[in-house]
Amino acid sequence: MSSSTQNFWLMKSEPSVFSIADLSRKKKTLWDGVRNYQARNFMINDMLVGDEIFFYHSSCEVPGIAGLCRVSQKAQPDPSQFDRKSDYFDSKATKDHPIWFAVEVEFLKKYEPLLPLSELRKYHDLLQGLPLLQKGQRLSIQPVKQEHFLFIKKLVTNMIS
DNA sequence: GCCAACGTTGGC
DNA sequence: GCCAACGTTGGC
């Protein structure tokens, strides 16, 4: 994946914690609190400024793709790992040797209504290999193939019009 | 609330 | 390095 061209992603968030509406209000946010090595490595190694991201609502009444954002700053040490009062505090991390990283993301669009997971499942043939649709897939940051990304964008457009 | 699937931890 | 036990994720 580590090319200089644009990559595409899906990032999960529980809307009760941070929703697409929150991002549209803030415009930009540091994607902190990721505590999974695979997700971290995607941020460090593969996420480029300008990469587009589906903002996914998980663990909620209607899980699905709730909007679009993009990487506005490359990965930097996640400050929450140093914060004793944070849920994301990590006693093993030091400023010289941070463990966790975060990219900054910028709001682009809110999808209204969101594109439900149940709707995406109807296209499992066309979306073959999309991590989101794979059984047991819990990764909070997932790569999305360009063809899948464009197809899903089209679904959103058709759904809204 | 249930539970399958997964990642992490820690004893050996 | 193995693997059982545990904690977490997340759809339903």
Image (cartoon, coloured by chain):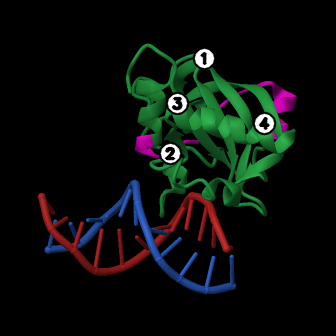
Chain colours: A green, B blue, C red
User: In this figure, which residue is indicated by the disc labeled 1?
Assistant: A50
| Chain-order first, disc 4 or disc 1 | 1
- Considering depth in this image, is A121 or A56 the residue closer to the camera? A121
Mark 2: which amino acid? Arg
* Mark 4 Cα shell of 10 Å, populated few (<14), some (14-19), many (≥20): few
At x 87%, y 30%, the residue is A25
Mark 4: which amino acid? Thr
At x 46%, y 46%, the residue is A36
**Letter of the chain that mark 1 sits on in the rendering:** A
At x 53%, y 22%, the residue is A76
Which residue is situated farthest in the top direction here?
Answer: A4
Let me know if residue A99 appears in the view.
no
Disc on res. A12: none
- Considering depth in this image, is A130 or B8 the residue closer to the camera? A130
Quarter of the C terminus of chain A within the rendering = top right
* Mark nearer the viewer, 3 or 1: 3
- Give the x, y percent position of residue A20: 79, 39
Q: Secondary structure at mark 2?
A: loop
* Mark 2 Cα shell of 10 Å, populated few (<14), some (14-19), many (≥20): some
Q: Secondary structure at mark 3?
A: helix
**Which range of residues does the magenta coloring cover?**
A20-38
User: In this figure, which residue is indicated by the disc labeled 3?
Assistant: A146
User: In this figure, which residue is indicated by the disc labeled 2?
Assistant: A35
Q: Secondary structure at mark 1?
A: loop
* Mark nearer the viewer, 2 or 3: 3
| Chain-order first, disc 2 or disc 4 | 2
- Give the x, y percent position of residue A130: 50, 47
User: In this figure, which residue is indicated by the disc labeled 4?
Assistant: A157
Mark 3: which amino acid? Gln
Do discs 2 and 3 share a chain? yes
- Give the x, y percent position of residue A61: 78, 63
| Chain-order first, disc 1 or disc 2 | 2
